[in-house]
């Protein structure tokens, strides 16, 4: 076999969404040599699909300050979020927005010229008072505006892009330091070793583990799979967010901004259902609460349509002008996929898989941390993670809408800041352990040959995985259903070892890409199902019918799932940096 080509950079960033690009920009501006690897052209990353906006206590529309944003985020997280990281994020938010403005993001404007902000779920003034208006938006295409601006700024700063390269696995030295990754060029199938002094995982979420999802086809949890195989456990994977308003049966997202602008949900009997579940915040309660409310209405026979399997989102009372100005993207989506104009008719919606709260454990500098002996959080040398693939954890058991765009920008930048310090102290590349290259190559080449004539197809297994996750790890869970889920997903993990693809060519072999993605999806599915089975309480998005209460005595702790040793736990960081801690309280909206 010909020697594998090698390239050296100061930093390798895997992922060109908002998180990866924010870090890359800061590093390139600091004169570091940066490689950004992305399996799709950068501006096709899922950040481009973000609609509603990004939270920051700018107080342009209502009174607001970062303490209230911090309180809302902790309450939204059902007290599982780490309070030091949440403080860091909420304090940094206004600066993150102004930076974007200077990068060229065309935010919508108020009449007085300042940045437009809209109401979103779970936002309040004065620690639980009236609705705060905190979400900065560029109409309902905020992610699109952010991603394109960041990409252009990176081109200006001369970041080196490897577009349409797929990252297979992390590479290490003999002491376990992370020294880059094995990637391959999707265009010609050729492998490439990228050696780097620091590696940042910014690969986004794993929403494709579910059948009905708002997530792009590319959101297959590859970074999570790479971390697991490198011996890093995944944190809090049982907390998967279901967005209340996906288009029923199809999954496309109708942004929370639709309710922020005044839209509301009605059931089959024509009632405004949220009045019953969240008397004060109503349709702007946090996402787990609204998703459970809709699922309950459907389960109890008050759904809409012939099968009573969805509810309706009403926007027609807002008037065509507001819809066209503030929600043009979702209007277009409804017209294209449903043949409905929301200015005239209600939209059929149901809860849809949306966001991976769990992920690769990091501290607030985005360093990946693992438990070592009695230390719950020791940094892994050279390895960072930011964005949806990371678990800092600022979202805890339930993320607030508008906090993810904020998270990816704040922690993308924080990662770059820490990496700059690391590079100053570690000036030379370390020698690679060639056995780690061999291991990664084996995984890459395994799909070139079929293990047996009767191996199953990747497509069939992928479909089965999504169905198992939906059936056994959905909005409501219980022991019997989860137990069966664990068994089925363990079987899938075995069956994939003998799976096959028919196409072994090198040029644009998407079958091979999908096979490698399937392995990552199954790893994420295992982590999610096992962690959900073990957590015998209800908190945030993890709702157990058999354990309906939150149990702070036993479960104020993060789950850590690893492939070799299964489940472990570590305490929640309840001490902020500069303010008093927010102790757990009943969560009422
Ligand atoms: C439809 C939708 C609407 C949303 N709206 C909002 C909103 O209004 N406000 C908000 O705060 N949040 C929103 N979110 C959530 C938010 O957009 C995402 O969490 C966030 O953009 C993720 O950014 P990221 O940088 O972590 O990853 P992504 O943008 O998902 O990018 C991941 C990158 O990793 C690369 N990658 C992955 N695997 C590999 C591999 N193996 N090899 C090479 N490259 C790889 C991909 O090519 C891509 O470049 C929304 C999400 C969705 C799905």
Image (cartoon, grey):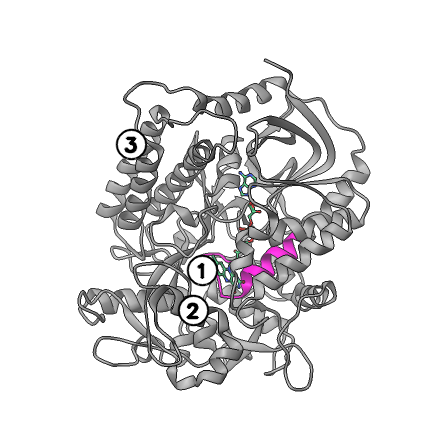
Q: Secondary structure at mark 1?
A: loop
Q: Number of labelled discs?
A: 3
Of pointers 2 and 3, the one earlier in the residue sequence: 2
Relative to 524, is 207 above or below?
below
Residue shown at the point (63%, 52%) measured from the top left: 364
Q: Which residue is mark 1?
A: 398
Q: Residues within 10 Å of mark 1 (few under 14, many from 20)?
A: many
- Place of residue 480 in the rendered image (x, y in percent of width and height, measured from the top left): 22, 46
- Place of residue 281 in the rendered image (x, y in percent of width and height, measured from the top left): 42, 78
Q: CA distance from mark 2 to mark 3?
A: 35 Å
Q: Is residue 23 visible?
A: yes
Left or right placement of residue 371 versus residue 468 in this view: right
Q: Residues within 10 Å of mark 2 (few under 14, many from 20)?
A: many
The image quarter containing residue 425 is top right
Where the C terminus falls, by quadrant? bottom left
Question: Is residue 401 shown in magenta?
Answer: yes
Relative to 14, is 446 above or below?
above
Q: Is residue 394 visible?
A: no
Q: Which residue is mark 3?
A: 491
Q: Secondary structure at mark 2?
A: loop
Left or right placement of residue 180 versus residue 251 in this view: right
Magenta range: 394-412
- Place of residue 288 in the rendered image (x, y in percent of width and height, measured from the top left): 38, 64
Q: CA distance from mark 1 to mark 2?
A: 8 Å
Where the N terminus falls, by quadrant? top right
Q: Which residue is mark 2?
A: 286
Relative to 311, is 60 above or below?
below
Question: Is residue 108 shown in magenta?
Answer: no
The circle drawn on residue 43 is none
Q: CA distance from mark 3 to mark 1?
A: 29 Å
Q: Are marks 1 and 2 in contact (CB under 8 Å)?
A: yes
Q: Nearer the viewer, mark 2 or mark 3?
A: 3
């Amino acid at each position: 076999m010909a020697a594998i080509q090698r390239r050296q950079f100061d930093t390798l960033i895997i992922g060109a969404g908002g998180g990866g690009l924010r870090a890359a920009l800061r590093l390139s501006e600091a004169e570091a040599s940066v490689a950004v690897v992305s399996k799709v052209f950068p501006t096709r990353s899922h950040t481009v699909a973000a609609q509603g906006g990004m939270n920051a206590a700018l107080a342009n529309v209502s009174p607001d300050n970062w303490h209230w944003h911090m309180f809302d985020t902790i309450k939204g997280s059902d007290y599982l979020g780490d309070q030091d990281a949440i403080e860091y994020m909420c304090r940094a938010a206004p600066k993150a927005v102004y930076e974007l403005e200077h990068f060229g993001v065309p935010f919508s404007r108020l009449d007085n010229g300042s940045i437009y902000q809209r109401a979103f779920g779970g936002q309040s003034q004065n620690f639980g008072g009236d609705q705060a208006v905190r979400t900065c938006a560029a109409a309902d295409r905020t992610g699109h505006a952010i991603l394109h601006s960041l990409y252009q700024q990176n081109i200006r700063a001369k970041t080196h892009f490897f577009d349409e390269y797929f990252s297979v696995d992390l590479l290490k030295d003999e002491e376990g330091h992370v020294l880059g990754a094995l990637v391959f060029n999707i265009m010609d199938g050729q492998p490439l070793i990228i050696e780097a002094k620091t590696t940042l995982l910014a690969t986004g979420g794993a929403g494709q583990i579910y059948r009905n999802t708002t997530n792009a086809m590319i959101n297959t949890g590859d970074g999570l799979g790479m971390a697991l195989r490198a011996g890093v456990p995944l944190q809090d994977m049982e907390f998967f967010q279901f967005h209340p308003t996906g288009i029923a049966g199809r999954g496309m997202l109708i942004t929370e901004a639709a309710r922020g602008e005044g839209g509301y949900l009605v059931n089959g009997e024509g009632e405004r259902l949220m009045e019953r579940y969240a008397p004060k915040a109503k349709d702007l309660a946090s996402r787990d609460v609204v998703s459970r409310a809709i699922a309950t209405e459907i389960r109890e026979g008050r759904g809409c349509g012939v099968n009573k399997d969805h509810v309706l989102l009403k926007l027609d009372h807002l008037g065509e002008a507001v819809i066209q100005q503030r929600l043009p993207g979702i209007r277009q989506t409804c017209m294209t996929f449903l043949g409905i104009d929301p200015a005239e008719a209600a939209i059929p919606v149901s809860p849809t898989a949306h966001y991976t709260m769990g992920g690769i454990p990091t501290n607030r500098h985005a360093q990946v941390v693992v438990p070592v002996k009695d230390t719950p959080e020791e940094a892994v040398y050279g390895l960072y993670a930011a964005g949806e693939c990371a678990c800092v954890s600022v979202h805890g058991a339930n993320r607030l809408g508008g906090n993810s765009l904020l998270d990816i920008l704040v922690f993308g930048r924080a990662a770059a800041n820490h990496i700059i310090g690391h590079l100053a102290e570690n000036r030379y590349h370390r020698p690679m352990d060639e056995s780690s290259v061999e291991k990664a190559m084996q995984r890459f080449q395994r799909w070139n040959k079929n293990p047996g004539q009767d191996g199953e197809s990747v497509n069939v297994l992928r479909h089965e995985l999504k169905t198992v996750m939906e059936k056994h790890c959905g909005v409501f869970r219980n022991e019997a259903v989860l137990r069966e889920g664990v068994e089925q997903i363990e079987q899938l993990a075995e069956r994939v070892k003998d799976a096959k693809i028919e196409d072994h060519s090198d040029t644009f072999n998407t079958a091979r890409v999908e096979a490698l993605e399937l392995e990552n999806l199954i790893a994420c599915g295992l982590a999610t199902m096992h962690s959900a089975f073990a957590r015998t309480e209800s908190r945030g998005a993890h709702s157990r019918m058999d354990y309906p209460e939150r149990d702070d005595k036993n479960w104020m702790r993060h789950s850590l799932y690893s492939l070799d040793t299964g489940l472990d736990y570590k305490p929640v960081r309840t001490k902020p940096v500069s303010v008093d801690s927010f102790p757990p309280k009943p969560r009422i909206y």
